[in-house]
Amino acid sequence: MTTNSAGLSKCLEKAELIGSPDSLETAPCDSSSKNEHGKQPLQGLKLASHKVLERAQLTGRLKCSKCNGSRMFYCYTCFSLVGVSQQEIPTIKLPIKVDIIKHPNETDGKSTAVHAKLIAPHDVTIYTYPCIPEYEGERHRVALVFPGPGSLTVEEMSKRLIEIEQKSSLSSQEEPCPKRAKHDKEAKNTGSPEGPLRDCPLQRVVFIDSTWNQTNKIITDERLQALVQVELKTRKTCFWRHQKGSPDTYLATIEAIYYFLKDYHEQCLAQEYQGEYDNLLFFYSYLHQLINKAKHSAGKL
C-alpha cells in the first residue's frame, strides 16, 4: 500500500512490523453475511481494555529479550510479549485444540497466528511446514478449515465427524482394543456431563497460515487429505491488507479461528454465545482501529 501521507505511512509501517494481520488477505469488512455488528466492524465485542496497548505504543519499540529484534507489543518470531506482561493481557481457554500450519515463506510480521498463541497459549500450537502433526487414525476428531468445493459448514462438519466416528467404532469392535476404547470414552467426556460436546467428537482444528497464492503446497499435502474440510462461508473479513482477486470470505488467520470457534460454540455445543472467544481479537481489533484512524486522518476513509 502506498500513500502520500507521511503519518499514514508511518502508522501502517508500524502495524506491519509489530505483527499486523496477516497472510490470508481480503477486503472490506463485515463480520457475517448479515453484518451482525452493523456498519462498524469489530463492534459489540467483549474485549479486555486496550489501555495496556496504548501505553506500550507511547513507549515505542523495545528489543525482544529472546531474539533481540525490535518489536512492539509482542515478538512474532518468538511468540512472546514485549513491553507488556502476561498479566496485562487477556488469556482464554479454548474448548478444542488449535493447530496452525505456517508456510515457511510466510512473513512472520504479517501473520495474525501469533495473536492466537498469545491469547490462548495452552491450546494453540504453531507448526512451520513441512512439519505437520500426525493425524492418521484421528480423522473423526480433527477438522481442517480451508475453503474448497468439498468444504462443509460447521454444522455439517459435526454430522460428518459423528458418521466417521461411528464407522470407526464399528471397525474397532471387530478387533477390540481396550486402550483405544478407554481413550474414546475419555474423549467423549471432555465437556460437561450433560453437554452436547459428547455428540461432536471434534478435539482439534487445523488452520493454514499463508498467503493464498502459497497455500497449494500445504493443502495438497497427503497428510491432510483425509481430514474433514470446513469453510466459513458466511463470514467476511475485516482485514485491511487486501489481496486482489480474493473474495471477501477469505479470512485472516485469527478471524478464521475466532469465527470457527464461535460457530462451534453455537452449532456444536448448542450454547448461546456470550463473547467467550472475543478476546482472540484483542490485538487484531486494536490494530484495525489504529490503521483506520490513520486512514481517516489522511482522508483515505
Image (tube, rainbow, N blue to C red):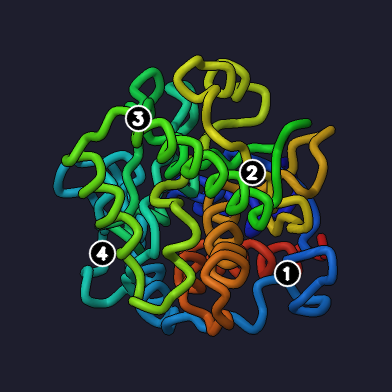
Element under disc 2 = strand
Provide the residue designation for mark 1.
297
Tag 3: residue type?
Answer: Glu
Element under disc 3 = helix
Decide: marks 1, 2 in contact (CB < 8 A)?
A: no
Q: CA distance from mark 3 to mark 1?
A: 68 Å
Q: Is residue 184 above or below residue 84?
A: above
Tag 4: residue type?
Answer: Gly
Q: CA distance from mark 1 to mark 2?
A: 39 Å
Judged by depth in the image, the label closer to the viewer, 3 or 1, is 3
Decide: marks 1, 4 in contact (CB < 8 A)?
A: no
Q: Residues within 10 Å of mark 1 (few under 14, many from 20)?
A: few
Tag 1: residue type?
Answer: Ser
**Quick one: label 4 or label 3, which is nearer the N terminus?**
4
Q: Quadrant of the C terminus?
A: bottom right
- The residue at the point 34 percent across, 36 percent down is 173
Element under disc 4 = loop
Decide: marks 3, 1 in contact (CB < 8 A)?
A: no
Provide the residue designation for mark 3.
174
> Residue 265, percent across and down?
54, 69
Decide: marks 3, 2 in contact (CB < 8 A)?
A: no
Provide the residue designation for mark 2.
230
